[in-house]
Image (cartoon, helix red, strand yellow):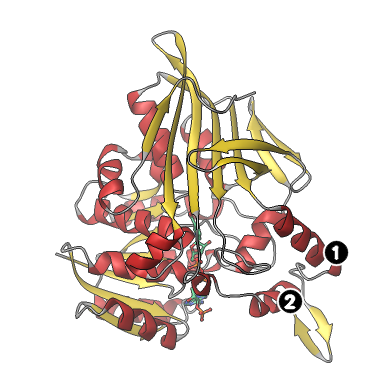
């Protein structure tokens, strides 16, 4: 029986608490977040005697250490924001607790994310005999595990990887983001970037796009974005010659985003407003709907997968593995939309891998560095069934 502390009471936190409460492996769950009312709301919905709540501003390491030492969890699941990754990793080291997150660190003052800051913790975690698992949501997360699974079972070498992410859902709002608006808009407005033959190629934001076919959904315009799992996957699978990430956006979403950018509302540098400092993007976040509030009337589904090609026994081979997740079904089950659901479920499975002693290697790791099989086995059981397609594939990789 294990104890788990979850930090962050947003859309993803809600799913993680529901799913942990449903697993007999977790005997006690502590949900800690900045706004305690949000923790109470989730606990009321979950209705499990295993769930306790606490107020915590995770930016203060000593407060987190105190809570960790009192509650003594086996693992901390960080589903707050990427800004909290390093402070929570510091607190876990000090309190002797394993760590898992779903998004890599980015400094608040610069819209730039990369793994280098967190990879630097490897020796400290190793020496402390603790495990830190980075990026264990869906993308990053399951996309890395899908790739590791393909390599283990179907390829001697992977050469081309295209991760494709479609949200074909409708939440009925003119403009809203499906996860934290600040993090989401920072990600999308960055230059696009992909990996080819040992180089990173940077292109203007949303400048490369093409229609891609998604199972049970059909063709959707998909935009090349830089996404964090590309960095770890090309490092850990060095035979990859090209790795790209694609995400669908509607024309209405892109138009709204362009207008917001043109108005300066996506800026992350503070401006003076009547004697106060205001960060326009933080102000915009305050105006936009909370991701968790979109869930109730969301219809349609998400579809995320990996198109992979390479060689097996000297022959070229192509393969696609994916999951589709229905917004309304996710809402019925846990009161969340599919983006939160597809992020929260893998975080819980990653934690189960650690508490079961399957992925509890000391050090800091990305998910593709572990055996994918036990994770893939649980993925369908916990609500994210996956499917494989062998040639012919609906997408050509050139
Ligand atoms: P939300 O904005 O809905 O929730 C974030 C929560 O973190 C809020 O409850 C917020 O509290 C809390 N929080 C923020 N700062 C602090 C702090 N200093 N101390 C304690 N709590 C804090 O975001 P989501 O649930 O949509 O996303 C959660 C994480 O999941 C993000 O890091 C996001 O990038 C990641 N993600 C990963 C995906 C993947 O597939 N890998 C996909 C989608 C999201 P408050 O309410 O007070 O602001």
Q: Position of residue 80 (x, y in %)?
A: 47, 70
To which residue does mark 1 refer?
Answer: 262
Q: Position of residue 241 (x, y in %)?
A: 58, 24
Residue 361: in sight, yes or no? no
**In the image, residue 81 above or below residue 306:** below
Where does the N terminus fall, quadrant-wise?
bottom left
- Tell me the residue at 22%/46% (across/down): 358
Quarter-of-image position of residue 224: top right
- CA distance separating discs 1 and 2: 16 Å
- Tell me the residue at 55%/40% (across/down): 164
Q: Position of residue 128 (x, y in %)?
A: 31, 57
Query: CB at mark 2 closer than 8 A to ligand 1?
Result: no
**In the image, residue 146 above or below residue 27:** above
Residue 222 located left or right of residue 359: right
Instruction: Give the total of numbered labels.
Output: 2
Outermost residue, bottom side: 275
Residue 11 located left or right of residue 15: right
Quarter-of-image position of residue 169: bottom right
Q: Closer to the observer: label 1 or label 2?
A: 1
Q: Position of residue 146 (x, y in %)?
A: 40, 37
Residue 277 located left or right of residue 243: right
Q: Secondary structure at mark 1?
A: helix
Residue 317 located left or right of residue 105: left
Residue 150: in sight, yes or no? yes
To which residue does mark 2 refer?
Answer: 279
C-beta proximity under 8 Å, tags 1 and 2: no
């Amino acid at each position: 029986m294990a104890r788990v502390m979850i930090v962050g009471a947003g859309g993803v936190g809600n799913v993680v608490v529901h799913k942990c409460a449903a697993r007999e492996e977790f005997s006690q769950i502590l949900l800690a977040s900045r706004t305690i009312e949000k923790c109470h709301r989730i606990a009321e919905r979950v209705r499990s005697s295993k769930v306790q709540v606490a107020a915590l501003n995770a930016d203060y390491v000593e407060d987190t250490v105190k809570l960790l030492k009192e509650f003594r969890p086996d693992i901390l699941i960080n589903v707050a924001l990427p800004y909290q990754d390093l402070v929570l990793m510091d607190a876990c080291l000090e309190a002797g607790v394993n760590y898992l997150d779903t998004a890599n660190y980015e400094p608040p003052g610069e819209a730039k994310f990369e793994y280098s800051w967190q990879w630097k913790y490897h020796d400290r975690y190793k020496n402390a005999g603790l495990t830190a698992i980075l990026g264990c949501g869906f993308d990053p997360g399951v996309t890395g595990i899908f790739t590791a699974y393909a390599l283990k079972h179907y390829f001697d070498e992977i050469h081309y990887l295209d991760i494709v992410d479609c949200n074909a859902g409708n939440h009925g709002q003119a403009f809203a983001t499906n996860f934290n608006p600040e993090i989401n808009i920072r990600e999308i407005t960055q230059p696009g970037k992909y990996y080819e033959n040992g180089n990173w190629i940077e292109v203007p934001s949303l400048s490369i796009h093409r229609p891609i076919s998604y199972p049970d959904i059909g063709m959707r315009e998909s935009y090349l974005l830089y996404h964090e799992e590309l960095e770890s996957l090309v490092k850990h699978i060095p035979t990859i010659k090209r790795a790209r990430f694609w995400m669908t956006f509607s024309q209405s979403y892109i138009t709204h985003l362009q207008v917001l950018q043109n108005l300066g509302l996506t800026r992350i540098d503070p401006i003076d407003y009547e004697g106060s400092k205001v960060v326009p993007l933080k102000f915009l976040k305050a105006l936009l709907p909370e991701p968790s509030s979109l869930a109730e009337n969301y219809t349609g589904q998400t579809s995320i997968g990996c198109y992979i090609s390479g060689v097996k026994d000297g022959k070229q081979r192509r393969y696609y593995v994916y999951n589709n997740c229905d917004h309304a079904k996710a809402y019925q089950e846990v009161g969340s939309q599919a983006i939160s659901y597809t992020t929260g479920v893998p975080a819980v499975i990653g934690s189960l891998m650690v508490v079961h002693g399957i992925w509890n290697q000391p050090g800091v790791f990305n998910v593709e560095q572990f055996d994918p099989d036990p994770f893939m086995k649980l993925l369908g059981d916990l609500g994210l069934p996956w499917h494989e397609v062998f040639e012919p594939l609906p997408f050509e990789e050139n």
